[in-house]
Image (cartoon, rainbow, N blue to C red):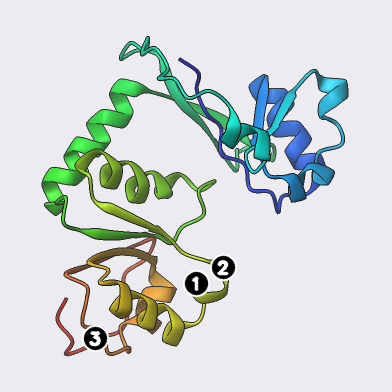
Amino acid sequence: GAAYLPIDPDYPEERLQYLMKDSGTKLLLTQEHLIEKIPFTDTMGISVIALDDERIAKAEKTNVTVRNKPSDLAYVIYTSGSTGKPKGVLVEHKSLMNLCHWYVNFHEIRASDRITNYLKYSFDASITEIFPCLITGAELHVLRGDIRLDMGKLNEYMNENGITVATLPYKVGEQFMQQDNHSLRMLISGGEQLNMQTDTEY
């Protein structure tokens, strides 16, 4: 029944602290190597769980009781904010599901698709990469940082893994369209209009 807040571990400590305090975070899921970036959690009363802690794999496995209602919060996402401080936007389950179902129907997402998560999960647009994929049973590929800005490696990964749907920022999309891609059936781009024309069909 909890709502989640995606936080980029590369944020400065001051911003991390602000987001957790402002959102009223009670529990932080992280990894062992990132714990040193959040020394303030003890004084804020935030419990920390390292997901790569070996004790988790050995713990008892039981299904969580489903108790969400459509009006419950699904997640909180922070925008830049007009005052200079990030502003949290509260998104309910019904809004998230409405977006997901529209996205699946409009883009004809299928269980056979293989979809990339290129955008950072702390960026609101990543929601359209992740959740429509998961609710249709498609395969989600979370891209490593070392291939995100290398168009040759990115294209090689897509071809080798049979990626069928990808979302790229427009500047990256313009560069990627010069690659010889054979796997994609759809390339989605946003932010600005693509300024490059190509004979390649997706």
Q: Position of residue 125 (x, y in %)?
A: 41, 49
- Determine if residue 25 is in view: no
* SS class, disc 1: helix
Sequence order check, earlier mark of 1 and 3: 1
Of the numbered discs in the image, which one, if any, rests on residue 145? 2
Q: Quadrant of residue 151?
A: bottom left
Q: Position of residue 7 (x, y in %)?
A: 62, 41
Horizontally, residue 165 falls left or right of residue 40, namely left
* SS class, disc 2: helix
Q: Nearer the viewer, residue 188 or 139?
A: 139
Classify mark 2: residues with Cα within 10 Å, few (<14), some (14-19) or many (20+): few
Q: Amino acid at mark 2?
A: Gly
Quarter occupied by the N terminus: top left
Q: Label 3: which residue?
A: 197
Q: Position of residue 141 (x, y in %)?
A: 38, 59
The answer for how far apart the CA atoms under marks 1 and 3 are is 22 Å
Contact between labelled residues 3 and 2, with CB atoms less than 8 Å apart:
no
Q: Amino acid at mark 3?
A: Gln
Horizontally, residue 77 falls left or right of residue 11, namely left
* SS class, disc 3: loop
Above or below 69: residue 130? below
